[in-house]
């Protein structure tokens, strides 16, 4: 009999978000390995037309979308998940995102024989007050299988939860999504630096901006291109205060097609992430692999999950995100490398993170 898995995720494409991309690529990898997949998720920060188009293209995944509507969102998710489990008695329930982890406890309380697989990204470990964190820890202790997306996340997890059987299952890509030709944009600057991700303290766009003055000493035409959902005006104020308006462009959220073009256009991907004031951390940095599969090297932060995402010295360079001179030197080193060799090394590294292979560890 064909196995049937349920993925419960806090987010899902076509909207932005690393957890959503991870859940989608995982679902496709499981499908390619002969598993039937159902998904319960939110689909946010995008248009209804984009969502309809996405659903039509992914009919092989049984997607149950929960529309956000205040507190009733949680009630609808719980009802939908319980109803689906009663109907299908899934072979495994995969939980990704903080509220999703809690649903493992609910299902194990209501039903016998529930097999839960938990995916820990890192940020969920510090989110919320003591009650939420206690629920999260209890959920992790009661999971049948626990995967962390990086060695950094596993070390963070084991410092909070007494569980030694945690395995690392890195983020990956659904390779067929990237076997598409894309045209380059006519973006200005050299080198063209790129960050893709929500504009937040955790993603570290401000660290790149702080380094621009140092980078300009060697590369006066440097231009930083920022792609992602924009939350507030803090970063734009920083650009104005630093008199860098001619060196920074905010592109906002891009379509999948335009995102591929962005990866084809820029010279170096930058993800100088850090923990934010809420304790939110970078568990891996899946956009680094997206850049790499397009032949683009990356510069990323030491002391975060990005250490697992970058093949240091071959497909990118790890730096101290708060040292502009170190960042500038990394850019200079990358630009002096053989471009063809570097692009091949980037693609080879990304291909090691093919979800068709990663998914086998979950079956």
Image (cartoon, rainbow, N blue to C red):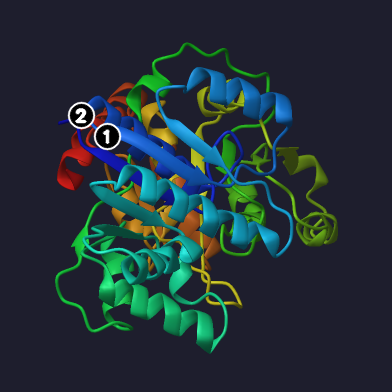
Q: Is residue 355 above or below residue 153?
A: above
User: How many C-alpha atoms fall within 10 Å of the one at disc 2: few (<14), some, or many (≥20)?
Assistant: some
| Proximity of marks 1 and 2: CB atoms separated by less than 8 Å | yes
Report the residue marked by disc 2: 33
Q: Name the foreground residue: 41 vs 91.
A: 91
Q: Position of residue 254 (x, y in %)?
A: 66, 31
Q: Residue furthest front?
A: 87
Left or right: 284 in relation to 183: left
Q: Is residue 4 above or below residue 144?
A: above
Q: Secondary structure at mark 2?
A: loop
Q: Is residue 153 above or below residue 332?
A: below
Q: Position of residue 305 (x, y in %)?
A: 36, 61
Corner quadrant of residue 82: bottom left
Report the residue marked by disc 1: 30
Q: Secondary structure at mark 1?
A: helix
At 64% from the left and 52% from the top, the residue drawn is: 212
At 39% from the left and 44% from the top, the residue drawn is: 333
Q: Which image quadrant: the N terminus?
A: top left
Tell me if I can see residue 173 in this picture: no
How many numbered markers are drawn? 2
Q: Position of residue 124 (x, y in %)?
A: 47, 69
């Amino acid at each position: 009999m064909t196995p049937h898995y349920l993925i419960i995720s806090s987010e899902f494409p076509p909207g932005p978000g690393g957890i959503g991309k991870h859940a989608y690529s995982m679902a496709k990898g499981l499908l390619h390995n002969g598993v039937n997949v159902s998904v319960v998720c939110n689909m946010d920060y995008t248009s209804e037309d984009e969502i309809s188009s996405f659903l039509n293209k992914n009919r092989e995944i049984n997607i149950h979308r929960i529309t956000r509507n205040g507190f009733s969102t949680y009630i609808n998710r719980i009802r939908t998940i319980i109803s689906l489990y009663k109907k299908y008695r899934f072979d495994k329930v995969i939980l990704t995102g903080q509220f999703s982890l809690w649903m493992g406890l609910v299902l194990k309380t209501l039903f016998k024989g529930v097999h839960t697989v938990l995916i820990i990204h890192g940020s969920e470990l510090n989110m919320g007050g003591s009650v939420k964190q206690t629920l999260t820890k209890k959920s992790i202790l009661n999971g049948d299988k626990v995967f962390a997306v990086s060695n950094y996340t596993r070390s963070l997890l084991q410092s909070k939860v007494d569980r030694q059987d945690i395995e690392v299952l890195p983020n990956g890509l659904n390779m067929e999504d990237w076997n598409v030709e894309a045209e380059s944009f006519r973006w200005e600057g050299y080198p063209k630096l790129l960050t893709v991700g929500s504009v937040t303290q955790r993603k570290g766009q401000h660290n790149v901006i702080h380094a621009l003055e140092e980078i300009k000493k060697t590369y006066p035409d440097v231009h930083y291109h920022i792609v992602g959902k924009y939350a507030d005006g803090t970063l734009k104020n920083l650009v104005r205060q630093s008199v860098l308006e001619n060196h920074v462009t905010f592109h906002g959220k891009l379509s999948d097609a335009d995102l591929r073009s962005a990866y084809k256009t820029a010279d170096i991907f930058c993800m100088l992430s850090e923990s934010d004031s809420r304790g939110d951390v970078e568990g891996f940095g899946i956009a680094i692999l997206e850049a790499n599969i397009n032949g683009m090297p990356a510069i990323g932060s030491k002391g975060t999950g990005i250490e697992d995402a970058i093949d240091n010295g071959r497909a990118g360079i790890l730096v101290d995100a708060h040292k502009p001179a170190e960042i500038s030197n990394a850019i200079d080193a990358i630009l002096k490398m053989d471009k063809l060799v570097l692009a091949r090394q980037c693609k080879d590294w990304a291909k090691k993170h093919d979800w068709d292979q990663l998914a086998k560890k979950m079956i």
